[in-house]
Image (spheres, rainbow, N blue to C red):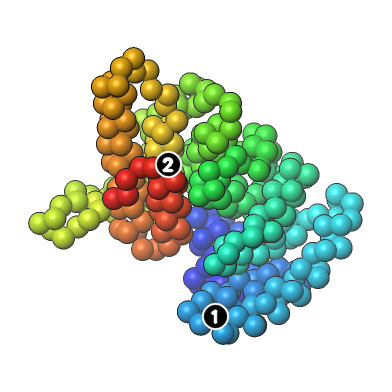
Amino acid sequence: MRNFVENMALWADITDPQRHFETEVSVRAFKEPVLRYAIFAFSSRHMNRKDNSDATEALQHHNCCVQLLIPALSGPRDSITEDILAAVAILRQHEEMDGEDNLFHLTGTTHILNTVSTFGSSGGLGEAAAWLCLRQDIYISLTNQQPLRTNLHSFHHSDVFQRTDDFAWSSRMVFLLAKVVQSAFTDSALAHGVQQEIEEWNSNKPDTFHPVRSAPRGPELDRRFPTIWMLLPVHVIGIQYYHIAKILLALSEAPRAHSAYESLRHSRLVEKHVRHHLLTVLGLAQSNSKAENTLFTARHSLVACELSMIPRV
């Protein structure tokens, strides 16, 4: 439990000013076995991640949690509480550590969100878990080049679209990236309004989203990626998601070339554009060690670019 609170809860709470997974989930886990077993499964897997032979403990906790989840998820809709959603979201984090990701718990979280659409704007732990689940869905959509499973309408009434604090600003960029991903891997055309919203987000973002220190990459300094120090992890995630959105927008832009030369020129411009934003995504992850889950996002971005046949940096 202490390992979860001190080292892992921030991954879930990175855009949550009230830190529900650190402060609320850990407290509820003393009385709610489904949360307790989910935390123990994820935390023990994290502690023994370098030694797969010690995965038995994590598996035992995981199985206990699943046994509690089955009747709740098989019952009526009102039996799916925010504790259930949070537990499945934690098990999804546990599942992400598997070498072969079967997406079982991702299927569970998206099913819950699409069935109980109020979680995305319910406030409290339910909404905090919903935003975590959305980020988890975005990761898989990027790496597998497939549409989102989550219905974004669930989030339309969230108060992050009215609030002006930094956590709300980052959550809005998460939502904007989700909209880009939703269009990028489906046959639907990307609405021009989304591109405009992304640029407005970048133009109007608070000053706290500007780096406190930055330095360009350069072989003479033995820096493969730019140095970009951000104030807090929440600022890292907002800026990182902005640059990932710019990558997808560049890759989704249809060429208007009328000749082979123009087509080649367009491809080179796209490659240059993507390289710049990808280096920024990687630099943000490397420069801000406390925002550990941005390393996961950087890895997923690399996979997405590789699958899109963009040369790796």
Residue 59 located left or right of residue 231 = right
Image x and y of residue 54, in percent: 58, 84
Image x and y of residue 207, in percent: 33, 40
Image x and y of residue 204, in percent: 39, 31
Label 1 near label 2: C-beta < 8 Å? no
At horizontal 51% and vertical 46% (from top left) the residue drawn is 142
Is residue 32 visible in the rendered image? The answer is no
Residue wearing tag 1: 52
At horizontal 61% and vertical 41% (from top left) the residue drawn is 148
Q: Could you tell me how many numbered marks the image carries?
A: 2
The three-letter code of the residue at mark 1 reads Asn
Q: Which of marks 2 and 1 is in front?
A: 2
Question: Which sits in the foreground, 160 or 301?
Answer: 301
* Callout 2 secondary element: loop
At horizontal 89% and vertical 56% (from top left) the residue drawn is 75
Position of 44 relative to 232 (above/below): below
**Residue 305 bears which disc, if any?**
none
**Residue 308 bears which disc, if any?**
2
At horizontal 36% and vertical 56% (from top left) the residue drawn is 285
Q: Residue lying farthest front?
A: 260
Question: Which sits in the foreground, 305 or 10?
Answer: 305
Question: Which sits in the foreground, 61 or 156?
Answer: 61
Position of 280 relative to 73 (above/below): above
Image x and y of residue 215, in percent: 19, 50
* Callout 1 secondary element: helix
The three-letter code of the residue at mark 2 reads Ser
